[in-house]
Image (spheres, rainbow, N blue to C red):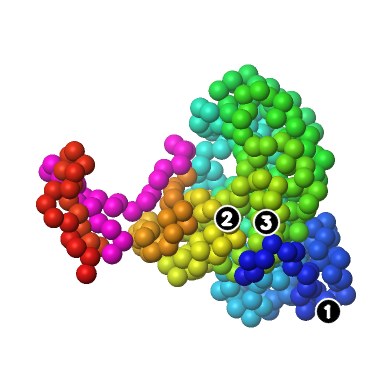
Amino acid sequence: MSQSSAEPVPSVPAAAAAEGVSAEEWSDWRWHMRHRITTLAQLRRWIEVTQEEEAAIAGCKGRYRWSITPYYASLMDPQDPACPVRQQAVPAPGELVADPTADVDPVGDRYFRKTNRVVHKYPDRVIMLITEACPVYCRHCTRKFHTTDVSGSYFRDNEGEDYEEDFRYIEEHGGIRDVLLTGGDPLSYRDEKLEAIISRLRAIPTVEIIRIGSRFPVLLPQRITPALCEMLERYHPIWLNTHANHPREVTPQFAAAVDRLLRHGIPVGNQSVLLKGVNDSVTTMRTLMTELVRARVRPYYLYHCDDVTGVSHFMTSVQKGWEIMEGLQGHITGFAVPQYVLTTRLGKIPLNPPSHIQRDDALELHNYRGEHLVLGPDGRPKGPAETPA
Ligand code: SF4
């Protein structure tokens, strides 16, 4: 990955060049949105589709949406069905297996929904689900019921223009100081529509910060245009959290998009999801977190994969999550270690591995190398600590 802040020269991948795609088209996010891969024939231009993938694509018809940007397709390994990028984007048979414990909405968006778009779980902040549209429909999406599931549309007015009810809710609940724009992916909207939403929010005196949850830096970094960044900068403080799950996604184009955001004063964080077969190894996660920090992206959360209908095949055990967290904590820079969390109807609950054991009136602590220290109830060491070898 390049550390340079200079714009990478857009090089058109061979599969696109063979179709006559120009460098100008490849660097234009709207071209990618117009040319998203939505058919088997189009997908075959990028990868050798397996029988399982073909069957899953057929099975998803009328059930789950799928689309892939040419940019994200260019990151896929054409020969390897276990490719971590491919698994996140190409339908798999596991999506169609009914899991009795899975739920379409395990995080409770529907339960906490107060208006068409506002979900209010915590006293001082809300999320606004402003669109169902995404550049790629990720197979592991927590909100699969209103992004990918064609039968579970969330919006009662088909994403109409009228947001006043949503803004009024925020105005009338004066304790709301933090609004997270999410969806779907808010950056699917053109700049003008996004600006209309953000400027109206900024006019609400109690709203201190506006956050954007967007996977565009990963799925289509060309979307992070200078014009978008200049628009966002007018409404500070704006924060953006993106969603990279594998080091293969941390490309020079990703780093350049992050650089543009940072140069306009927009801090960038990352939320990963722990996905079986994609990133459930210490080595992969260490590389991901250190590569993100090299790109000046702060790892924020590592989500335990929710038991969402159509997503259960990506779930790992909490034990696996602890093994990974123990492989990060102490082994890499402290701020490169995300917080391991589970999203529930009760809110986000930290799932970090226990670092201590309570023994009568003492706390036994261990460090990343397994060395021990015993603390009394006053927080002072009891007895000699183990001396590192
Ligand atoms: S971009 Fe985000 S909201 Fe859209 S499908 Fe992917 S994970 Fe879900």
The Cα–Cα distance between marks 1 and 2, rounded to whole angstroms, is: 34 Å
Q: SS of the residue at dot 2?
A: loop
254 shown above or below 375: below
Mark 1 or mark 3, which is nearer to you? Answer: 3
Q: Amino acid at mark 3?
A: Asp
Above or below residue 175? Residue 12 is below
| Image position of 382 (left or right of 65) | left
Q: Residues within 10 Å of mark 2 (few under 14, many from 20)?
A: many
Q: Image quadrant for the C terminus? A: bottom left
Determine which of the numbered discs, if any, sits on residue 231 in the image: none
Q: Quadrant of residue 361?
A: top left
Give x and y (percent) for residue 38.
76, 63
> Pointer 3: what residue?
259
Pointers 1 and 3 in contact (CB under 8 A)?
Answer: no
Q: Nearer the viewer, residue 287 or 293?
A: 293
Separation of disc 3 and disc 2 at Cα?
9 Å
Q: Helix, strand, or loop for circle 3?
A: helix
Kind of residue at disc 1: Ala
Magenta-highlighted residues: 344-369
Query: 296 or 11, which is in the foreground?
Result: 296
Q: Is residue 375 above or below residue 278?
A: above
Reading the chain from its start, which is encountered first: label 1 or label 2? 1
The yes-or-no answer for disc 1 within 8 Å of ligand 1 is no
**Residue kind at label 2, given as amino acid type:** Val
Q: Which mark is residue 18?
A: 1
Number of the label disc, if any, that sits on residue 297? 2
Disc 1 and disc 3: Cα gap in Å?
30 Å
Query: Where is residue 327 drawn, in percent x and y?
Result: 38, 64
Q: Is residue 189 visible in this depiction of the protein?
A: no
Q: Earlier in the sequence, mark 1 or mark 3?
A: 1
